[in-house]
Amino acid sequence: MIDLPPWAAPNGCDVSLVDFGGYLQPGLGGQVQRIDRMGNRFSISVSFPPMPSKDKGRILVSRLIRGKTEGVRLEFPLLSFKPGSPGEVRVNGAGQSGRILIVDGVTPNYAFREGQPFSLEVSGQHYLHFVDAEVIANATGQATLSISPMLRVQPSDNAVCHFAKPMFEGFIMGEQWSWNMSLEHNLGISADIIERG
């Protein structure tokens, strides 16, 4: 997995939910049913500001070339949202599944916000999730979170949850990847990335 440099902050980002579920639509006017399947994930289309080819642009292109086959990891943009000091949030108990995640190690009375992104790190791989509803951790730093999408892997006890700096990782989509070289000696760089799991 290739880490993008911390200075490679996107200036634009389109986020998509990749849904593996479906709908059963009866032919005779019955009720539509939703079938959920584990594995929903996110894809992002990121663009970066023009970068000088002599230094930063050259390095970012090199990382993305390698990331085409090895995968890339970058910080998920929080824009103006400030997560504050959530603490060292960890999974509290092995074998969890579904859309509920029990955590501990939270700063006492920390407020998780609806729509707050975080990445769950399991065996070195990050999985992006969002908090479904506001929850306030108790005085001992424990909380039960409703999350979307549902867990794609069963995290081990004490798996790390990154709320202060959520990460996004995956593979660059498409059979080819390209960048723009301008006469001003800047590089125009963008990429479509889908989570690998």
Image (spheres, rainbow, N blue to C red):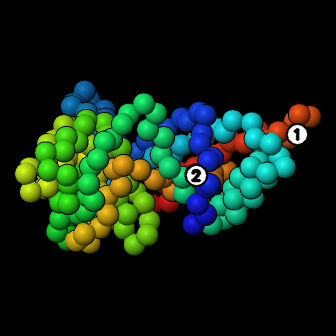
Helix, strand or loop at label 1? It is loop
Residue visible at 31% across and 58% down in the picture: 161
Query: Disc 1 residue type?
Result: His
Whole-percent x, y for residue 181 in the image: 86, 41
Q: State left or right for residue 129 relative to residue 62.
A: left
Give the farthest residue toward the top.
29
- Count of numbered tags: 2
In the picture shown, does residue 97 fall above or below 79? Answer: below
Q: Quadrant of the C terminus?
A: bottom left
Whole-percent x, y for residue 127 in the image: 40, 57
Viewer-side residue, 197 vs 115: 115
Residue visible at 19% across and 52% down in the picture: 107
Residue visible at 20% across and 60% down in the picture: 105
Q: CA distance from mark 2 to mark 1?
A: 22 Å
Classify mark 2: residues with Cα within 10 Å, few (<14), some (14-19) or many (20+).
Answer: few
Res. 87 in view: yes
Query: Which residue is disc 1 drawn over?
Result: 185
Give the farthest residue toward the right.
183
Whole-percent x, y for residue 45 in the image: 59, 40
Q: State left or right for residue 88 relative to residue 166.
A: left
Residue visible at 21% across and 31% down in the picture: 31
Q: Residue 81 has which mark?
A: none
Query: Disc 2 residue type?
Result: Pro
Res. 178 in view: no
In the picture shown, does residue 44 fall above or below 61? Answer: above
In the picture shown, does residue 155 fall above or below 186? Answer: below
For the residues labelled 2 and 1, say whether their Cβ atoms are less than 8 Å apart. no
Query: Which residue is disc 2 drawn over?
Result: 6
Classify mark 1: residues with Cα within 10 Å, few (<14), some (14-19) or many (20+).
Answer: few
Whole-percent x, y for residue 16 in the image: 48, 39
